[in-house]
Image (tube, rainbow, N blue to C red):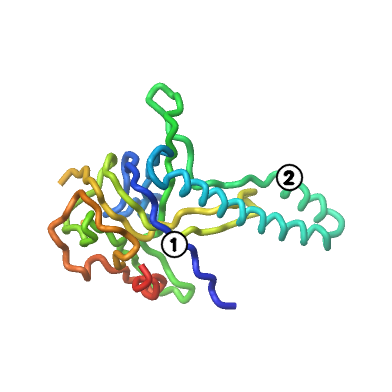
Amino acid sequence: MAKAKLKKVVSPRGIAAPYPKLITPDEYEGDHAYKCGLILDPADEGVQAFIDMLKNEAQTAYDAGIADLNAQLADAKGAKIAKLKDTIAGMELFLPFAKSYNDDGTEDGRYVVSFKRKAQGQYPDGKAWVHNLPVFDSAKKPIAEGVDIWGGSVLRLQTEIMPWFQAGLKKGGVSCRLFAVQVIELESGSAGGSDGFDVEDGYVSDEMPAAQAQPVSQEDAADVEDF
């Protein structure tokens, strides 16, 4: 069966939550990953439609997983019936966003959407791969080497919507696989194609050689021309 093409979208403008990892991957227990929480205000253009899309995609993935469990239940016998019923009853819908809060613990009416992708790994044959996350300025130019992105930066993020359903975790929904970054306004302490973004008024970088912005994993090479 051919691999399904994932839905690729660009987020509305949002504010990077504290401690984004978009230039140097975060490392935790041997896992290297690019990460960013994007704070979105429903009052801003396109935000509510984006949130609603994520809800709908998550519900579709969840419903498909529940349907599969129910199909297994119809053919099950004995103890497996009880186990499947318990799994179905305990399943939860996973959404890739949460409410945003003020310092005093009250809701501020915004959402924080989580984006992530692995920066390195291994293919089934054991060969290593590395992914360099493409990062562009407001004019769709690759940002200069050495520039870092801090919380408070205004960004748009290109993402692939990743449906998943794990009965063992009793959760199903979607995750936002980070594909590329556009920096509209930069907060910094001091580095695919860009067709998914529009040229924006805002931060313009000293140009970095395009080769430094290209993903190098075989996993992504075929997708670059579509972005």
Q: Dot 2: few (<14), some (14–19), or many (≥20) neighbours within 10 Å? A: few
For the N terminus, which image quadrant? bottom right
Residue 12 pos. (x, y %):
37, 49
In this view of the protein, which residue sits in the foreground, 58 or 30?
58
Q: Residue furthest top?
A: 104
> Which mark is in front, 2 or 1?
1
Residue 126 pos. (x, y %):
44, 73
**Secondary structure under the numbered disc 2 in the rendered image:** helix
Q: Dot 1: few (<14), some (14–19), or many (≥20) neighbours within 10 Å? A: some
**Secondary structure under the numbered disc 1 in the rendered image:** strand
In the image: residue 22, left or right of residue 49 = left
In this view of the protein, which residue sits in the foreground, 44 or 32?
44
In the image: residue 153, left or right of residue 204 = right
Residue that carries the numbered disc 1 in the rendered image: 8
The amino acid pointed to by label 2 is Ala
Residue that carries the numbered disc 2 in the rendered image: 89
The amino acid pointed to by label 1 is Lys
Q: Which residue occupies 39% across, 56% down?
A: 10
Q: Which residue occupies 21% across, 68% down?
A: 210
Determine whether 135 is above or below 40 in the image: below
